[in-house]
Image: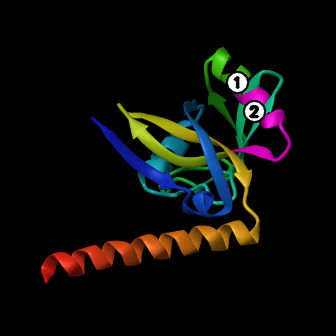
Amino acid sequence: MGERDAAVNRAAGHNYFLTDRFECGVELRGTEVKSIREGKANLKDAYGLINNGEAFLLNAHIGPFSHGNQMNHDSTRTRRLLLHKEELRKLGIKTKEKGFTLIPTRLYFRRGKVKCELAVAKGKQDWDKRETERKREADKEARAAIVRSQRA
């Protein structure tokens, strides 16, 4: 009963500088958990929000459960995130700074419970994205050169 990723937000690392990461629980309905187990979760446009001392996950898409009935859940409803008061206070302070927001980076199962990894993020400009891509390409070429030199 270890960890298993259910959904990963790959665009988050490309579009944002991710700083601090927090693990939080997610308040879900039964059909939502079953849909996540089926792999129907998507975090691409999702973001976090601190409001009145509570954290919420907005725009996270969890598709309807395949064997659900008319009581199935709404796909993009607002879900409450479960954090300790001290973590909520820290996140509230960090998100009040200009340019910072909360981005969910992944949904995963830990000991049968759905957890969300929430990162404090600052948006990247286009030139930041190009610079990151250049660094990645340079590192890749350097690793390839080391492997070639070791083979010869």
**Above or below: residue 48 compared with residue 152:** above
**Which residue appears farthest toward the left when viewing the image?**
152
Residue 50: in magenta span: no
Q: Position of residue 50 (x, y in %)?
A: 77, 32
Q: Which residue is mark 2?
A: 94
Asked whether residue 14 appears in the rendered view, the answer is yes
Which residue occupies 56% across, 57% down?
9
For badge 2, the amino acid type reads Lys
Q: How is the image coloured?
A: rainbow
Residue 98: in magenta span: yes
Q: Position of residue 6 (x, y in %)?
A: 44, 51
SS label for mark 2: helix
Label 2 CA crowd tier, 10 Å (few <14, some 14–19, many 20+): some
Q: Which residue is mark 1?
A: 90
Left or right of 27 on screen, residue 139: left
Left or right of 94 on screen, residue 6: left
Label 1 CA crowd tier, 10 Å (few <14, some 14–19, many 20+): few
Quarter holding the C terminus is bottom left
Quarter holding the N terminus is top left
**In this view of the protein, which residue sits in the foreground, 78 or 117?**
117
**In this view of the protein, which residue sits in the foreground, 89 or 152?**
152
Marks 2 and 1 sit apart, C-alpha to C-alpha, by: 6 Å
**Above or below: residue 94 compared with residue 130:** above
The reply to whether discs 2 and 1 touch (Cβ–Cβ < 8 Å) is yes
**Above or below: residue 34 compared with residue 44:** above
Look at the image and give the residue range highlighted in magenta.
Answer: 91-102
Q: Position of residue 20 (x, y in %)?
A: 60, 37
SS label for mark 1: helix
Which residue occupies 63% across, 70% down?
131
**Which residue appears farthest toward the top when viewing the image?**
85
